[in-house]
Image (spheres, rainbow, N blue to C red):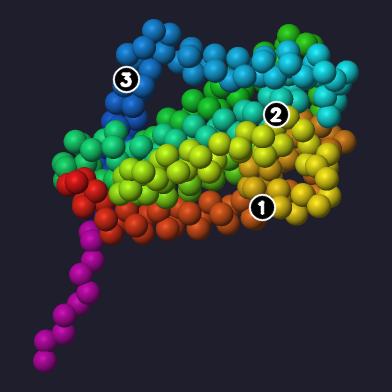
Amino acid sequence: MTHHLPSQVPPGALSARRFRAVRTVLALVLREVATSFGQSPGGYLWAVIKPVAVITVLTLVFAKAFRAPALGTNFPLFYASGFLPFSLYGDMGNKISKALVFSRQLLFYPGVRYIDAILARFLLTLLTQLAIFLLGMGLIHLFYRLNPILDVPAIALSLAMAAALGLGIGTLNCYLKSAFPIWEHFFAILTAPLFILSTIIFTFESVPRDWRGVLWYNPLVHVVGMMRRGFYPSYDAPYVSPLYVFGVALVTLALGLVLLQRFHRDILNM
C-alpha cells in the first residue's frame, strides 16, 4: 500500500511568496500616492485643508451661539476630537470601497490579488489620516497654548476603532458597490445623517434619555466618545464599548472578504 504524505510548502517558497505579497502591496501604495496626490496642485495639502476647514466652520458657527463647548472651554479642540476620528472612518471606508474599481486593470495580473489592493488603500489612508490627526491636534494645542492631560491609550484605541470600522464597512461596500452600482447612492442616503448622529457637535449625555438607546447602536458614537475620553480627563464616557465597534468591524470585514473571494472575478469581468 502506498501512503501519500500531505504536501507541504517549503519554507523558502513560503518566504518568497510573502515577500512578493509585501512588494506588491508597497508597489500599489506608491501607485496610490502618485495617483491620489501627485496629479493635483498641493497634493497632500488638500487632504489637510478639508478637516481644518470643517473644524474652523464649526468653531465660527457654534462659538457665536454658545459661550463654551459641551466639554472644556476650547471649541476647536472639542470639534476636532469628534470630527478627526469620524474623518478617518469616512475616508477609510470610501477609499477601500473603490479598491476594485481603482485597480481593476492590475488585478488581471496573476501576482496581484484583490486583497493587495485593499491593503494598499488601507495603509495609505491610515498613514494619511494619522498625519492629519497629529498635525491638526498639534496646531490646535500650539496655537491656543493648551496643556491637557492626555490619555494616549484611549486616543490610540479610538483611532484603531475608527480604522477597523472603516476597513470593515469599506470591504463590504467594495463588493456591494462593485456588484450593484446603485448601492452607492443608497448608502450615501443612508449615511448622510451620520455627521449629526455621531455626537461630533454635542455629547452623548446631552441627548434625551429616550433617544440614547437608539443612538448607542451607531458605532461612531463610541469612536468619538473614546477620543474625547482621551482629551478630557473628567469625561469618563461609560457608554463606550470597543467590543461592540470591533465586533461590527469584524463581521462586516468577514462578510466582505467572503463575498469578494467568491465573486471578485465576476466583478472584474463585468
The residue that label 3 is drawn on is 34
Identified by mark 3, the residue type is Ala
Magenta segment, which residues? 1-10
Label disc, if present, on residue 217 of the rendered structure:
1
Identified by mark 2, the residue type is Ser
Query: Taking 146 as reference, is 250 left or right?
Result: left
Prevalent SS, magenta region = loop
The foreground one among 228 and 195 is 195
Q: Residues within 10 Å of mark 2 (few under 14, many from 20)?
A: many
Residue at (32% x, 53% y) in the render: 260
Q: Residue furthest bottom?
A: 1
Q: Quadrant of residue 62?
A: top right
Above or below for 14 versus 22: below
Whichever of labels 3 and 1 marks the residue nearer the N terminus, that label is 3
Q: Nearer the viewer, mark 2 or mark 1?
A: 1
Q: Quadrant of the N terminus?
A: bottom left
Identified by mark 1, the residue type is Tyr
Above or below for 202 versus 205: above
Query: Taking 85 as reference, is 213 left or right?
Result: right
Q: Secondary structure at mark 1?
A: loop
Q: Answer yes or no: do the residues labelled 2 and 1 have beta carbons within 8 Å? A: no
Residue at (42% x, 50% y) in the render: 172
The residue that label 2 is drawn on is 81
Is residue 3 shown in magenta? yes
Residue at (34% x, 30% y) in the render: 29
**Where is residue 66 shown, x and y percent of the image?**
85, 20
Q: Answer yes or no: do the residues labelled 2 and 3 have beta carbons within 8 Å? A: no
**Where is residue 156 shown, x and y percent of the image?**
64, 37
Whichever of labels 2 and 3 marks the residue nearer the N terminus, that label is 3
Question: How far is disc 2 from disc 3 in space, using C-alphas?
Answer: 30 Å
Question: How far is disc 2 from disc 1 in space, using C-alphas?
Answer: 20 Å
The foreground one among 235 and 210 is 210
